[in-house]
Image: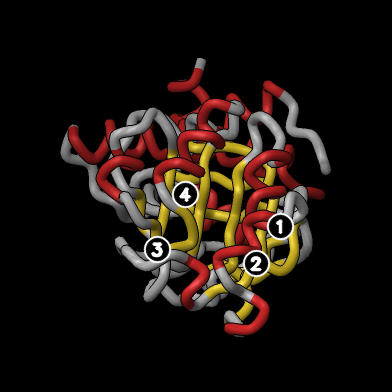
Amino acid sequence: MNSLSSSTRKKLGKVSTATIATCLFKKGLKNQFIQGVVPLKSRNGNMVGVAFTLRYIPAREDLNPISVFKDKSHPQRVAVETCPEGAVLVIDSRKDARAASAGSILATRLMKRGVAGMVTDGGFRDSEEIANLDFHSYHQKPSAPTNLTLHQAIDINVPIACGDVAVFPGDVVVGDNDGVMIIPSGIVEEVANECLEMTLFEDFVLERVNEGQSIVGLYPLTNPEILSEFEAWKS
């Protein structure tokens, strides 16, 4: 799994998913925002971590009884016990929230192991309990039935789809109160630096707009004189 430097993690902790989306769009990446997922609870500060993935397929009853949990190599159990500290567990539940991707006990275990958060394009059971944990978590909507009724855990740390976005192990996951963005691992430092600069510029723009300035030429920036004003403002 690719590592994420502490400085890059810190930078991504200060920028919004909206800013990241704009930055990636400028680089030709238009589909990096996981569709249909929301935080279980609004929080101060971003979720930032390297993606560790779990993939479900439709359950087949003869292969997915409750006794499968006796198997120590069961992919869901292995994912919870091996997802690295500081990583984000991203679950491909085929956008199906009729059965839970996980519940509060697994979420608590991940939290205690130092995992940064978890994301599913399905649903979590015990959602109120998960929301009350000091742990970032994103899903489509609450769900009560066990995952075994519809989902069969099949793979860990492989490329997956989550909310119509391709997620590769090692990609960087950033979540805020709007949702979750996936940043390809090869450009994460570049994106972090550009987004930090974009965030500074947006702060400058908001200050000017609050002072009554028109957005024409200011946002988006098309007036070179304003760029000079921004450079002076930064210093």
Indicate which disc residue 74 carries: 1
2 and 1 marks in contact (CB < 8 Å): yes
Disc 4 residue type (three-letter)? Thr
Between label 3 and label 4, give the one nearer the viewer: 3
Please tell me which residue is depicted at 63% across the width and 44% down the height of the picture.
Answer: 80
Dot 4 falls on a residue whose secondary structure is helix
- Distance from disc 3 to disc 2, alpha carbons, whole Å, reads 15 Å
Judging by the rendered image, the residue that carries numbered circle 2 is 153
Q: Quadrant of residue 60?
A: bottom right
Q: Earlier in the sequence, mark 3 or mark 2?
A: 3
Query: Residue 117: x percent and y percent?
Result: 52, 40
Image quadrant holding the N terminus, namely top right
Dot 1 falls on a residue whose secondary structure is loop
Please tell me which residue is depicted at 44% across the width and 67% down the height of the picture.
Answer: 122
- Distance from disc 3 to disc 4, alpha carbons, whole Å, reads 21 Å
3 and 1 marks in contact (CB < 8 Å): no
Judging by the rendered image, the residue that carries numbered circle 4 is 17
Q: Earlier in the sequence, mark 2 or mark 4?
A: 4
Q: Earlier in the sequence, mark 2 or mark 1?
A: 1
Q: Is residue 111 visible?
A: yes
Please tell me which residue is depicted at 67% across the width and 29% down the height of the picture.
Answer: 85
Disc 3 residue type (three-letter)? Gly
Instruction: Please tell me how crowded label 1 is: few (under 14), some (14-19), or many (20+) other residues with Cα within 10 Å.
Output: some
Of 117 and 64, the residue lying toward us: 64
Disc 2 residue type (three-letter)? Ala
Tell me: residue 109, above or below residue 139.
above
Dot 2 falls on a residue whose secondary structure is strand
